Amino acid sequence: MYRADCPSRPILDQIADKWSMMAMAVLERPRRFNDIRRRLEGVTQRVLTQTLRRLERNGMIERRVLPTSPVGVEYSLTPLGESLREPFGRLYDWTVAHAAEIQECRQVYDRRTGSAETGSPGDVENA
């Protein structure tokens, strides 16, 4: 189960990525690229493009070219992607519910060790 060649590893890497989780969260309905980007403060166009391509490749989202002028593109969750909404929602709710407690633990740890990690992966202040 924890072997390096386990097929779940690349999938977990994709869906556990913060931008993937947030992009899927804003797709409660179909949205255009720029709408997704506006909702995800801090994401670059390049990173969002890569994220959406990976999600499409893994079958989590669908990309649809709209017959408009200029041509537009709309993204939506597939049934497979939709099946992740509940577990993602539960994880997000847990994060929000425990953010203050985790922040307090960090402060206690930093005082005890005399160090403070800033901007480290997994920061919950920005959740």
Image (spheres, rainbow, N blue to C red):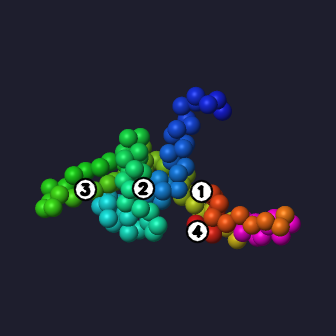
Residue 80 image point, x, y percent:
42, 43
Q: CA distance from mark 4 to mark 2?
A: 18 Å
Residue 91 image label: 1
The numbered mark at residue 8 is none
Labels 2 and 1: the sequence-earlier one: 2
Image depth: mark 4 or mark 2 in front = 2
Between 94 and 53, the one lying in front of the other is: 53
Residue position for label 3: 73
Q: Which mark is residue 47?
A: 2
User: Which element carries disc 2, helix, strand or loop?
Assistant: helix
The residue segment tinted magenta is: 102-112
Name the spot of residue 119 as percent of width and height, x first. Answer: 63, 64
- The residue lying at 32 percent from left, 54 percent from top is 75
Quarter the N terminus occupies: top right
Quadrant location of residue 58?
top left
Indicate the quadrant where residue 57 lies: top left
Q: Secondary structure at mark 4?
A: loop
Read off the residue under disc 4. 126
Q: Can you see residue 28? A: no
